[in-house]
Image: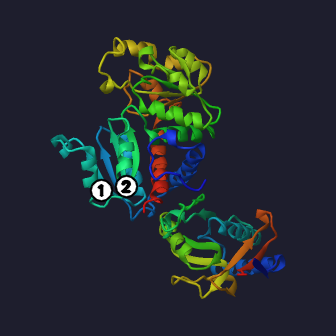
Amino acid sequence: MEQKKLIINPQLLDVTLSRLCHQLLENHDRFEDTVLLGLQPRGIFLANRIRRKLEQILSKEIPLGYLDTTFHRDDFRRRTAPLKANTTYVPFLIEDKKVILIDDVLYTGRTIRAALDAMITFGRPRTVELLVLINRKYTRHLPIEPDYIGKAVNTLDSQRVLVEWQEQGAEDSVWLTTKQDR
Amino acid sequence: MEELRSKHLLGIQDLTREEIELIFNTADNFKEVINRPIKKVPSLRDITIANVFFENSTRTRLSFELAEKRLSADVVNFSSSGSSVKKGETLLDTVNNILAMKVDMVVMRHASPGAPHFLARNIQANVVNAGDGTHEHPTQALLDTFSIRSKFGGVEGKKVAIIGDILHSRVALSNIFALNKLGAEVMVCGPATLLPKHIKSLGVKVTLDLREALEWCEVANVLRIQLERQQVKYFPSLREYSLYYGINKQLLDSLNKPITIMHPGPINRGVELNSDVADSEHSIILEQVENGVAVRMAVLYLLASKVK
């Protein structure tokens, strides 16, 4: 049995995304030297939304790339099957840019560690910030904290946070699922 | 398909179509990696690979070594010239000595068909066949078909002619297996003496006429005459071979369609291919070499996940 609890509904998600965009604008002004990097596979939906909103507000194009962390992960060979990679698409230079990494859920921090590694293979950024929709608190394995947070939640290790997007054929929403032993 | 079934890559014959497609999809990702400013990922940093070459090689060996280094594996190289093989050490002894130095994977080229299969049965390490005599050269066939896929968007239904010394070519055999599995049509073409007797049983078309092969195909994979494997004369002279089976621009221009030209290398210019063809815009020979690194990275990555 799995129990599902709605933690963000479509209306709230839209408000949250707008707030995140405005927080980004506070720090990055006209986005002159700033680029967005969405993390594959699930962070790219959030990254696309953030970009669309920013472009509406600024009426200009914001550079967005997709970064896949598979080959930089630290759990290769510790799993039974090899990790399956996704497309990396970084159509700009990262050298001396302000990079905003975007992912849907921050949990142990290991994906972000891998992402930092993967990112510097494209050059040396001036600064790097992290934006997440959901920050799971007290679950970190590494000293990594987000700069922009959609919502912080307290979770157990046995729970999962599920982010669904319209683009995947669902309703925009975030769920907390709990496995229940019978 | 999430992973390969075997921990070795001994031949295309053992692979399923799904496994080949898994390798291709993984290679797509590595092709992106090797075009980055920093062309290196840390996936195989705790893996040691020995490249054991009992036969000459330039491309394959460099390509494997680059693939290994770009995956951050530790690499040791061995070639039989200048080694203790000359002093009479057996294959198994040589390899076991290398393995005693804690090597996880062995990439081997050997003149005897079946040598990597023998090795795989007798050692713990993962074995990758980098060419065994006239039998198979799986990574070459993978990179050839991957290059066709890159150029045309797919392999299914493509008409591929393999032209030249089919009898002595491991590239031809592995390519036939791979192309058949991926749903391409294959025709082999060469002098009767250089076509194996029962080649039709592999489900390929056969012709002795180069023009017929070129008129039929969309892709021509041209092979070198393997003089080093020919103990008797199979044709009167290279000059005569070149007259009947050499491809030049004039011949290609006389066809009413463009043909993509491939060659596994090394090319004997002026024998099987003229320079005006090898260097033309229809040739994807250097793309093959680039794809070779990505495909070998994919193979090593997928096999390394099975290293205990």
Query: Looking at the rendered structure, which numbered label has been put on residue B56?
Result: none
SS type, badge 1: helix
Please state which of residues A130 and A91 is positioned toward the viewer in this rendering: A130
Cβ atoms at labels 2 and 1 below 8 Å apart: yes
Residue A6 coordinates in the image, percent (x, y): 79, 80
Tag 1 subunit? B
Q: Which residue occupies 62% across, 37% down?
A: B152
From this view, report whether residue A130 is shown above or below residue B183.
Answer: below
From this view, report whether residue A98 is shown above or below residue B244.
Answer: below
Amino acid carrying label 2: it is: Ala
Query: Looking at the rendered structure, which numbered label has been put on residue B125?
Result: 2
Tag 2 subunit? B
Q: Which residue occupies 38% across, 48% down?
A: B121
Q: In which quarter of the image is residue A8?
A: bottom right
Residue found farthest to the left: B87
Query: Looking at the rendered structure, which numbered label has been put on residue B99?
Result: 1
Amino acid carrying label 1: it is: Leu
| B73 left or right of A108 in image | left
Q: Is label 2 on the same chain as label 1?
A: yes
| B67 left or right of B30 in image | left
From this view, report whether residue A13 is shown above or below residue B143.
Answer: below
Q: Which residue occupies 48% across, 49% down?
A: B294
Please state which of residues B117 and A182 is positioned toward the viewer in this rendering: A182
| A139 left or right of B163 in image | right
Residue B189 coordinates in the image, percent (x, y): 50, 20
- The reply to whether residue B121 is in sight is yes
